[in-house]
Image: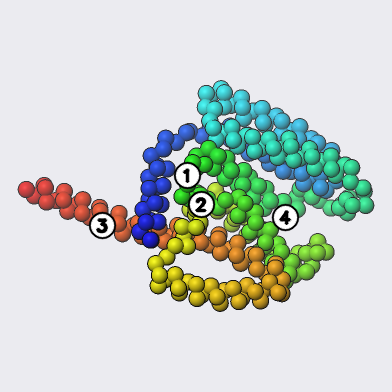
């Protein structure tokens, strides 16, 4: 079974290498990224009741959105990736950002955040930096998937964005269980030092080359002996999960989501280790054949 899965992964890797890669105009995509960033910053400004700043940021995003298309046309390098990335950026900068602006304008003043005039802008809060990284990486991951990887059936390249979002959300619930201060919009030591770095790790996994299974059911087919051992272990795992559920669902979801995140990392690392000896052996055999033919 392991040999079958390994051969399928190798075949998917060969298909990916064999496919003609479409060039990506980095300069045009850089302008798209700036437009996306301005949309995110506008959302943060609206949440902080900085409505003038939020409006200016949306208008500035229009300028950079026009620049990315102009650069792509001038260099004659309009790509499918650029189109997908630009669409996702437009959704945030010209869809979500104006929507949040209107929502916050109509929200009663007593529900707005209380920010002292002496305080720095909400855009400068530490959590905003990690949020910007996470959202941009999610957009890059989706654009890459839509352009290059939608046809692959065996695996995803990079952590899927729903899994990343679900893991981050379950981690917040996990932290909320152990540090109830989150209910009062206060971060405890664990949340303060763990939440933002964890979000960045998930962001990097989304744009990484780590493989995650797409057809998950195939991974549950074992020969009889390992199958019975796995089912026996499952009985103990279910007992732990049952205890956790009766206590709180919040402490169950995060370990389950984290298991999926770790599975892709471990599976990719295992494939890397298992493929290296094969390459080394084939190279040594090729060197030996070359030596034998030259000696003749």
Q: Which is nearer the N-term, disc 3 or disc 2?
A: 2
Q: CA distance from mark 4 to mark 1?
A: 38 Å
Mark 1: give few (<14), some (14-19) or many (20+) Cα within 10 Å. Answer: some
Q: Which residue is mark 4?
A: 126
Mark 3: give few (<14), some (14-19) or many (20+) Cα within 10 Å. Answer: few
Mark 2 vs 1: CB contact within 8 A: yes
Q: CA distance from mark 1 to mark 3?
A: 29 Å
In the figure, is residue 280 to the left or right of 156?
left
Is residue 168 among what the camera can see?
Answer: yes
Q: Which is nearer the N-term, disc 4 or disc 1?
A: 4
Please state which of residues 15 and 118 is positioned toward the viewer in this rendering: 15
In percent of width and height, residue 99 lies at 79, 39
Q: Which residue is mark 3?
A: 281
Q: Which mark is residue 296?
A: none
At x 65% / y 47%, what residue is drawn? 135
Q: Which residue is mark 1?
A: 152
Q: Which is nearer the N-term, disc 2 or disc 1?
A: 1
Rendered position, 146 above or below 189: above
In the figure, is residue 228 to the left or right of 48?
left
Determine which quarter of the picture holds residue 222. bottom left
In percent of width and height, residue 219 lies at 46, 60
Q: CA distance from mark 2 to mark 1?
A: 9 Å
At x 51% / y 34%, what residue is drawn? 24
Report helix, strand or loop for mark 3.
Answer: helix
Mark 4: give few (<14), some (14-19) or many (20+) Cα within 10 Å. Answer: few
In percent of width and height, residue 289 lies at 16, 51
Mark 2: give few (<14), some (14-19) or many (20+) Cα within 10 Å. Answer: some
At x 59% / y 73%, what residue is drawn? 238
Q: Which mark is residue 214?
A: 2
């Amino acid at each position: 079974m392991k040999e079958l899965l390994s051969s399928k992964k190798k075949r998917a890797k060969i298909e990916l290498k064999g496919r003609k890669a479409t060039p990506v105009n980095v300069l045009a995509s850089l302008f798209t990224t700036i437009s996306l960033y301005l949309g995110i910053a506008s959302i943060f400004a609206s949440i902080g009741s900085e409505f003038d700043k939020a409006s200016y940021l949306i208008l500035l995003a229009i300028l950079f959105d026009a620049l990315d298309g102009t650069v792509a046309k001038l260099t004659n390098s309009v790509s499918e990736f650029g189109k997908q990335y630009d669409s996702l950026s437009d959704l945030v900068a010209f869809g979500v950002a104006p929507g949040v602006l209107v929502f916050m304008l109509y929200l009663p003043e007593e529900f707005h955040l209380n920010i002292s005039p002496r305080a720095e802008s909400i855009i400068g809060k530490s959590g905003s930096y990690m949020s910007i990284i996470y959202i941009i990486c999610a957009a890059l991951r989706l654009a890459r998937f839509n352009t290059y990887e939608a046809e692959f059936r065996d695996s995803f390249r990079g952590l899927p964005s729903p899994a990343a979002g679900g893991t981050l959300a379950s981690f917040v619930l996990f932290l909320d269980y152990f540090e109830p201060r989150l209910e009062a919009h206060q971060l405890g030591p664990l949340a303060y030092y763990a939440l933002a770095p964890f979000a960045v790790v998930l962001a990097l996994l989304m744009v990484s080359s780590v493989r995650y299974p797409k057809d998950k059911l195939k991974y549950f087919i074992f020969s009889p002996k390992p199958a019975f051992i796995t089912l026996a272990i499952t009985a103990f795992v279910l007992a732990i999960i049952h205890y956790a559920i009766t206590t709180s669902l919040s402490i169950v979801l995060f370990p389950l989501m984290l298991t999926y995140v770790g599975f892709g990392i471990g599976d990719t690392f295992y494939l890397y280790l298992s493929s290296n000896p094969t390459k080394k052996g084939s190279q040594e055999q090729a060197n030996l054949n070359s030596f034998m033919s030259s000696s003749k």
